[in-house]
Amino acid sequence: VEFFGGTVNVKYVSVLFCGDDAIDTDQGYQGKIQFAYVVLDENSHHGAEMDGPNNADAAVAQRSFPQLYNALFVGHVLNDPNSASSDDALAAILRLREGTGGRFGNIVVTNVASDGGVYRSNCGGETHTTDPSFSGVDTLFWSPNNIVNAPAGVDQFVQASSCSGVTAFTSINESPELTLQPTDPSSSSLFMDPLPSSTSSNLYESVDAVPDSWFTTVDYKGAFSASDNWLIGLSWLDDNARVPANVGGTAKCGTISSSETWSGAIRLTCQVFVADGATLTINAGTTVYAYASDINGNAPALVIEQGGQIQAAGTSDAPITFTSAVSDKNLPARGLWGGLIILGRATVHGRAGDNTIEG
């Protein structure tokens, strides 16, 4: 998406696996952007390239001043932009260049590859600051509350010699605690869920106030709240059954070793095993929504192991339903979850001992 000049304002932007820059601002663009979800694949260029104008002269007549709040930039841990780049083969998920100003708050950057998360170059007289009280088009504000999740040995921020002496940017370096976001995303990824894992995640801490009334007031960082997947009806990911609908409910994943009860809406985000000695009770009226794949490419399923028990008594008025978490428009369809598997101890004719089943 390119914003060259002007003041157009945009909410809800999804850019996936793009060979060029996902969000590109230049030529004095001074608009506002909120709720942006950008996903890079191995060969993508940059998540954002923000220039302006085409030279770094401090005496520019109109400096670019994009205001970007509540964006989630998902890199690819092996990203290499050389195959796609036409003007800048250097990496980094965000690039701030050529004297651009701007305001950047509630930003989340994750899956940072080896060349850093945010790169500044060709600075041109703009004031770099982490103080939100600074304002004006000659200011480049980066909130220290932003998250740039870089692995050990990889820089969150890198700057060219042309930006020596400017204020250092800082950000929180923590996992953003997303529900299901691959580290190597691509158009072949089976499933993803970029929403926060819960309202207790770090995305609900140290949230920046939005600059003015055009922006929607939020209590979270990144592009999504824990309850609203706005990609539904708007994105290729929804059209191709790669994200869950807004089914809500409690996420379940892993082994159940002591008895528990499910009710309401339940989301299977990975395979769930009811272990020997444990009983899973599912109340009438419960709906279990399963994802199509977990982070390792395995289909989420409910498996009752030998010695485990399931007690599930629905009624005609309040049935227990197992289904896929994808949008209704993608159903019915096969292969969107792993099923319900009950492993008993009954004798199977012609089989001795324990045998492996095909899931």
Image: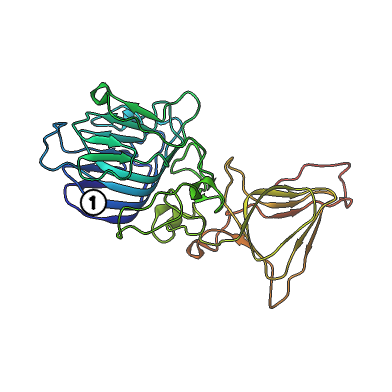
Residue 45 makes an appearance in the image: no
Q: Amino acid at mark 1?
A: Gly
| 77 vs 198, nearest the viewer | 198
| 63 vs 256, nearest the viewer | 63
Q: Is residue 46 above or below residue 347?
A: above
Q: Secondary structure at mark 1?
A: loop
**Horizontal side, residue 280 vs residue 197: left or right:** right
**Horizontal side, residue 19 vs residue 260: left or right:** left
Q: Is residue 218 above or below residue 92?
A: below
**Horizontal side, residue 57 vs residue 336: left or right:** left
**Horizontal side, residue 342 vs residue 345: left or right:** left
The residue to which callout 1 is attached is 31
Q: Quadrant of residue 323?
A: bottom right
| 142 vs 78, nearest the viewer | 142
Q: Residues within 10 Å of mark 1 (few under 14, many from 20)?
A: some
Residue 183 makes an appearance in the image: yes
Q: Position of residue 17 (x, y in %)?
A: 38, 42
Q: Position of residue 263 (x, y in %)?
A: 69, 65
Q: Position of residue 8 (x, y in %)?
A: 22, 55
